[in-house]
Image (cartoon, rainbow, N blue to C red):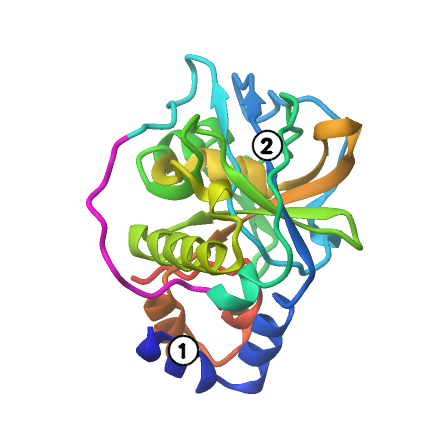
Amino acid sequence: HARVMSKIGGRDESCRRYHGTMKRSIILLHLALICAVRNVHGFSTSSRDASSRPQKPQQAILNEHDDDDARISRGDDDARLASSSIDRRSMLSGTMAAVSAASLSASVAPLPASAADTSTGTTTSAVTPQDLLARLRRVPCFAIVDQDGTPYIIVDQKARFGTGYFFLTFRGALSVLGDAQQRAKTEGYEKIWEGARITTVPMDIAIRLSLKKVERAGQNNLKMDTIADILPGMDERDDALKLDKSGRFSEQGSVPVFF
């Protein structure tokens, strides 16, 4: 843990600003997301473009979906220690309380079917959105869920905006969960995390849920906008920042891959 915090402390100013957005008053909201998806257009419910969303980090969302999409698995992985890609203490700071939620559906934007070559003005043939999502379905992500498989979302009480998280590494999700459980035990609300575990989620689902803000209703008909973010491992993010000096990977929600 000391090594993780040392890494966080040594980042440049843009990274510190990134982690600084975590320091919000937060409340834990359990949401069950029912995704009746048959293609990239297959969600319903009021939503807004994710490009206008506020940068407010927090934890993980998920769902059940029909035969055309891979289902979330419920494997019990062995505990492992490591770093996450976010400042876990800041993310979990503040008052937390469990809130049950009604089932809901989400609206997801379609993915482009072709890519334009700006240098020549031509459009190149590309895979269809369905093909792309089918490929991404083979890539695992991880989410923190309760004993019923309901994922955790953290909500900014003032803004009434919720953020869910998918983790690209099991170690990152496990590290966040461990810190959350320890803090809850210290502050006397450990029941919130009873039965919490890490589950796998196909990346196509994470992509779908990160494309749009979705208005969701919880207990007492509390409504708020929610969005999902996909978080890389801390080591991977640090490596990306060393290789790419543009700053694009210092922003919340950025996910580097390497080739």
Task: From this view, report whether residue 253 is shown above or below residue 32.
Answer: below
Residue 160 in view here: yes
226 lies above or below 20 = above
Q: Is residue 191 magenta?
A: no
Q: Residue lying at the far front in this picture: please name it.
A: 188
Kindly identify the amino acid type of the residue bearing the numbered disc 2: Leu
> Would you say 235 lies left or right of 127 here?
left
Sequence-wise, the earlier of marks 1 and 2 is 1
Q: Residue at x 38, y 23 (%)?
A: 71
C-alpha distance separating marks 1 and 2: 30 Å
The residue wearing badge 2 is: 31
Q: Which residue shows up at 73% across the image and 57% down it?
A: 54
User: Disc 1 marks which amino acid?
Assistant: Met
Q: Which mark is residue 54?
A: none
Residue 24 as seen in the image, left or right of residue 200: right
Q: Tell me the quarter of the image containing the C terminus.
A: bottom left
The part of the chain drawn in magenta is 75-87
- Residue position for label 1: 5
